[in-house]
Each structure stands twice: as C-alpha cells, then as structure tokens.
Image (spheres, coloured by chain):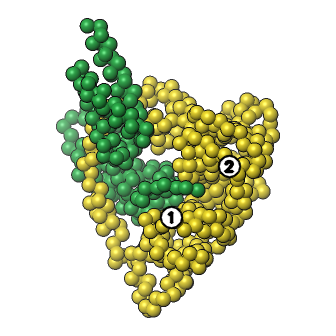
Chain colours: A green, B yellow
Amino acid sequence: MQFNVNVKKRLFPDGFSAPSPETLFRENFGRLSYFAFRYVQDKAMAEDFVQDAFATYWDRKETVSSHPAAIKDFLYTSVKNSCLNHLKRLKVEERYFVLRNEESFENEKVLEGIIEAEVIANIHRAVAALPESCRKVFIMSYFENLSNSKIAKILNISVNTVRCHKQNGLKTLRSQLNLETFLTLMILISR
Amino acid sequence: MSLNPYQLSELITRYIQQKLSESDRLRLDQWLNESDDHQKLFDRLVGTEKLKTGLEYFDNIDLDAQWEKAKARSFRPNRLRPYLWYAASVAAVLISVFVFWPKNDQPFAQEYIATVDRPMFDLEPGNVKAFLELEGGDIIQLSETNDPRLPVPYLNGALNYMRSAFSALEGGYHQLSVPKSGTYRVVLSDGTKVWLNAASKLRYPASFSATSRRVELIGEAYFEVAPDRSRPFLVEVGSNTVEVLGTQFNINSYDAQWSTTLFEGSVKVSSDHASRLLAPGQEARIKNKQISIRKADLRKAAAWRDNEFYFRNESMFDILSELSRWYDFEVELKDIPSERKFSGSIDKRLKLSEVLKILKSLSGHEFYFDGKRLHMK
C-alpha cells in the first residue's frame, strides 16, 4: 500500500474523531467570525464573540455531543446569540433598524449565513492549499474582469490553468473562462 | 428533504470544485428545487463577487494570534486540568507512566504535574459505537444496546432494517457514521450485511426501492450482499462505483488509492473512464481513475473483522495509520522513515501501550505522545 502524503496534512479532515482543541479552533474560527461579521460589521467584535463561543464550549464540553455537526451547531448558536444581544443593546434611532435586524436572525436567514460562511471558508482552505503558482492563476483568472484586450493574456494563462486544474480540481475556473472568452470572441467576430 | 447546513455547504463547495458525485448532484438539485431562496443563495455563492470579498476577509485573520489568545484563556498551564477527554483516563495515566517511560526516575507526583501540558496516557482499543443520521436531520448516538427509541431494532449485534416499517418513499436516506475507535454493523432492508470499520460512513436508503440498491461509502466496510438478480447492488465511493451480484467483498477507501477485495461472487468496479470485472481472490485498486487488478491478500482484507491487525511487508507509517484509526490518535508523520517493512499480526483488543511495546520490539523504535500526537524515534 503506497501512500504519498504531505507532512502537515491531517489524515481525517472530515471529523471522525473528536478533534484537538487547536484543530477545532483553527478550522472554525474564520468561518464563525465571518458569520458574526455579517451581523455586527465589526471585525474585532466578531472575533471577540467567537473567542467567547469557544471558551464556553470548552467549559461545558461534556454537555455537547461529540458529533462534529453538533459542535458546529453549538458554536454558531453561541455566536449568533452574542450578535443578537449586541444589536438589541445598540442605541437605535429608528425602530425600522431594529426590526430589520431581528428578521435577519430568523432560522432561514441564520442557515443562509452559516452556509455562506462555510462555503467561503472551504474554498479559502482549498485555495490556500494550492501551490503558489496555481494560487496566482486562480486568483487572477477568477476575479479579474475579462475584457477584449485581455484575451491574449487569457490564452497564455490557459495553459498554466489547465495544469493547475489537473493538479487541484478548481475547475469551475475553466468553465468561467471559457464562457467569458466565448462571449468575448462572439462579440469580436460579430463586429 | 433536509440536509444540515454543513452538508449543504460541502455540496456547494464540491460544485465549485467540480468534484460532485452523482448522488451529490441529485441531492444538490433537490435542495435547489425546494425554493427560490435556495437557488438565489446558491447563485450568490458561486458568483465571484461574494467569494472575492469573502476570501479577503479570511486572508485578514491572524489565526496564530487568535489561537494564542484562546489557549491562554481556556488552557492555562497552571490549571491542573488537562483536556477533558484525558480526565477520564486518569487511572490509566497513573499506571502507564511506568509502562511508557521505564527509564524515568523522577518522583511520580512531580512527573504528573510536570506533564499537564503534555499529558501521558494510554488508549483503549475501539468499541462498538456510531452515530445514525436520519432523513430529517436528527442524530442518534448508537451503542451495543437496543433502545426502543431507535427507528429500527439492534438485533444480534447489528442495526437491523429488514423488518422495519419504512416504505421506500418514507424513510429516505440514513447515514451511519462510525468515528475513530468505533466499529458497527448494519443489516440493510434487503438483508445485505455490512461491517463498518473505524472512521467510516455509510449512506443508504432506509428501504431500498424496487429497482435498485445503491449505497455510498467513505472509509472501510465489508459487505455480504443478499442475492437479488432483479436489483443490482451498487456501492459508490467518491465518483467511482462497485457493482455487485450476491457477493462478499471488502472496500478500503481510506487513502487516495483505494481498493476492493473480493471474497466470493462477482463484482464490477467502475471509475469515470473504465470498468473491470473481479474474480474471487482478486483485489482491484483505483488511483487517479486507473483500475489495476492483482491477487488479493485475503487475510489482510479480513483481518480487521477478525479482531486482528495483520501486516505483510508494510511500512511503519501504514501500520501506525491503521492503529491511529482504531485507537483515535494522530501520527507525527515526519518522524517516520518509509524504507523498512514489517510483517506480523497483533490482537486488536490490546491497549495501545501493549501494541506499541510489540512494535518497539519488532522495530527498535521508541514511541511517545505529545498531546494526542504519536512520535517515533
């Protein structure tokens, strides 16, 4: 059984054993603080709320099921409550402001917030794991506005992009590029 | 059907990476069709705008500093309280100090306090435990006892779906998650028996439909499939499929290269590009969508169910990987040279300290723990 593995890589990233506190923290801090930031719009405060949530969790660890989803539920709920309490305490000038925020704490909206935080965190982790050259290709290609004048540049990048895709599976890049390239080409041709 | 937000996020992430399996695709489409809001959220997330600002936010987090802060708050060294899951094994700590470090001649009490930051402990072997996730999102903790609150009974050492009242439409999909140091058995609605090894998950319908029997696997499982020519039995592992016809086989999918070993019957293994047929006594290995067939080491594939760790010409890394799943610890990879190979068999019911003693006499290596991480020298 041959096995090639990156020295730092964890063998079971999807939570089969109760993770060490540090692992649990490093994996979830970012996403939880992003989730809080969406509510309070203050990075330092968001981070404080997440620190509180972890401290509470470790303090009452034995009352929470060790299933990874249960732990996340606990942490997200903890952070959500901190945000809710904070917003309630804010001096508000308009009743409308308060009402609008209360709606955003409804279950449906909270779930959306969690999904958004989780997806972005997962992608961030995937991008961070890419080799430097591939990361640059991904960032340049995914986020740059593609205009006519950059088509040549795009075509140059695509060779590297293909190599990076084969290595790392961030393939939506290719379909995006192709679509925009195609459209741009169509515009060019039709002129 | 409701998925928890973490499962949904995983699906959406896989969509962005184009790593969706067929079942994943179905589940994602089902969720998208449930409501316009779902579709809108999805579109926002896969668009570049949200992703770009989101990634910037994450880049600006100083994770190391935050961890130092958290550590100082909850794990101060002068608090004589090691991580909670070590607290339960205090008795084991007191005894095992002598077993692990026989050369240590410091006074005992001093040794314990000095090592609060680096707790020393022994680990028990695995036992029968798992989590069952139902269609509605409920999660039930499972053990060896039958509980009337379980949706299906636990009979003769397995969760038994054969005589359940689920119709194919009602029960939906269940997922059995076996954590590290766990093991579990289940009998599916058609009578197929499945043994699950530690760190594995099986997703299956509570009641198979009239036309097919399809399950999904992560990790390792042994199947004894009930014969039914009218319904092929398929096991999906990532984007690959193993199709079977009344057989006994083992699938080990812990690594990037995973394998299917056939004991009896016949099996067809398919990746995206190719299919191969297996005969009993053969093993198919799949890596990067390539399938290769070789003669199986049947004893190796069956060992885990026979309460045995069985190694034949394997590196210390592979041996420790398997141990880490049964005893639930992590391995410090850079200590381990891969050239030397070892063979032998060890009883799985031993405590870890005893297993490590055997490995020490086999290899000459010393083992020690730093937190929950095993090091070798």
> The residue marked by circle 2 belongs to what chain?
B
What secondary structure is found at the residue carrying circle 1?
A: loop
* Left or right of B227 in this view: B64: left
Identify which amino acid the numbered label 1 is placed on: Ser
Q: Residue furthest left?
A: A93
Q: Decide which of tag 2 and tag 1 comes sooner along the chain.
A: 2
B38 sits to left or right of B232: left
Q: Residue at x 48, y 67 (%)?
A: B337
- Closer-to-camera residue (B343/A170): B343
Q: Residue at x 36, y 45 (%)?
A: A130
Q: Which residue is mark 1?
A: B338
Query: Badge 2, how many Cα within 10 Å: few under 14, some, many 20+?
Result: few
Residue closest to the eye, B52 or A31? B52
Disc assigned to residue B294: 2
- Residue pictured at 39% horizontal, 44% vertical: A126
Residue A11 visible in the displayed image: yes
Using a 10 Å C-alpha cutoff, classify the residue at mark 1 as few (fewer than 14 neighbours), some (14 to 19) or many (20 or more).
few
Q: Is residue A37 visible?
A: no
| Residue B308, horizontal then vertical, whole percent | 69, 66
Q: CA distance from mark 2 to mark 1?
A: 23 Å
Q: B352 above or below B44?
A: below
Tag 2 secondary structure:
strand
